[in-house]
Image (cartoon, rainbow, N blue to C red):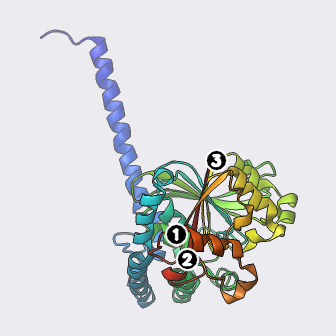
Amino acid sequence: MAPVSLAVLNSGLRCLIQLTALFVALLCHASVTVDGTSPDVQARFLAGLPVRDTPLASLALEHSWVEHATEFDSAWKQLETRQLAKIREWSGTFLSESATASDPVLYFFSGPDFLYAQAFFPNAETYVLCGLEPVGAVPDITKLPAGALGPSLQNLRKALNAVLSFSFFITKDMKTDLNNTQLSGTLPILYVFLARSGSRIESVEPVGLDKSGALVADKPATRGARIVFFGPGGNRQTLYYFTSDLSNDGIKANPAFLHFCETLGPAQSFLKAASYLPHLDFFRSARDFLLAHSKVIVQDDAGIPLRFFDREKWSLRLFGSYRAPIETFKEHQQPDLAELYRTSNPAPLGFSFGYTWHPRDSSLILATPR
């Protein structure tokens, strides 16, 4: 038999090492995905999805969780039919370039509403959400006190009721709902949206920003969280949520969030049910930032008013119809927008958007730079 050369032996050894490393990696991955304390399993539990063969399986036998799962299954089936499937279809038709791009998505005044950001922009590599609502602690079902599971799940459903029924959160209710529970802050809601969208969470960690907008671990000027996940299409994506005051005074005192957004480059921007804050001069800095840093803006009439879009710089396409803001915000009527709707023959909208619950009363504005 001919002697085996040293090169062949080295090649075989390298292959063995690579196979061993791959096998170890697969074992480690399996241990993460079946660990009851892993964020993905926690998210599935909170979303009322099966968690068989995990340490949370026994908790999923409790009546409170079975009731939770049943109600969520029903609510999500209706939401998918009434809203999400139609939004994805609209996005594929009218946001064909944006929806397939990896450009970041900026969603100011969002609260934890990742659900709609992902529906409109499913392929973004990075989502950045911002609101006044606190981040909260990373959820851990195993540490809930005895008897707290049922009330915590019930309160989570209560916090999500408005966005599931009407497509937006009610801010004053959220302040109570996100603090009145063992599962506090925005993270439990983000978990539910990710799990129900078919995403798989890889990691979750608290993050912070210094005044320059750089990510830091200690003494942050702005607090937030970073969730790395694999979306329904299998792409690795990142979701940031930051708690920050976007008023002029808030940005002047702490510009960290806008500095962070600047580092991401031109973005796809999204505004929905923003309490008409972009209409106010008190939020001019945030409004001007979006106009200067967006390659597309998708919004309802509560977003940036028509008068701030320079028509020589922006092309506007209207969808749905515009009549008047709901009674709570009646002072933010836009006669110029009503006239543009009257004369431009806008395309119909098959889903509700913003503060109006019926598609025939909803307005959607698609703005792109010329």
The correct choice, above or below, for 112 with respect to 361 in the image is above
Quadrant of the rendered image containing residue 252: bottom right
The amino acid type found where label 1 is placed reads Pro
Question: Where does residue 200 sit, x and y in percent of width and height?
Answer: 44, 60
The amino acid type found where label 2 is placed reads Ser
Quickly name the residue at label 3. 266
**CB contact under 8 Å: marks 2 and 1:** yes
The amino acid type found where label 3 is placed reads Pro
Q: Is residue 36 visible?
A: no
**CB contact under 8 Å: marks 1 and 3:** no
* Callout 1 crowding tier (Cα within 10 Å): few <14, some 14–19, many ≥20: some
Question: Where does residue 114 sit, x and y in percent of width and height?
Answer: 55, 67
Helix or strand or loop: what does disc 2 sit on? loop
Q: Residue at x 51, y 84 (%)?
A: 358
Q: Earlier in the sequence, mark 2 or mark 1?
A: 2
Helix or strand or loop: what does disc 3 sit on? loop
Quickly name the residue at label 1. 346
In the picture, measured across the screen, residue 154 lies left or right of residue 330, that is: left
User: Nearer the observer, disc 2 or disc 3?
Assistant: 2
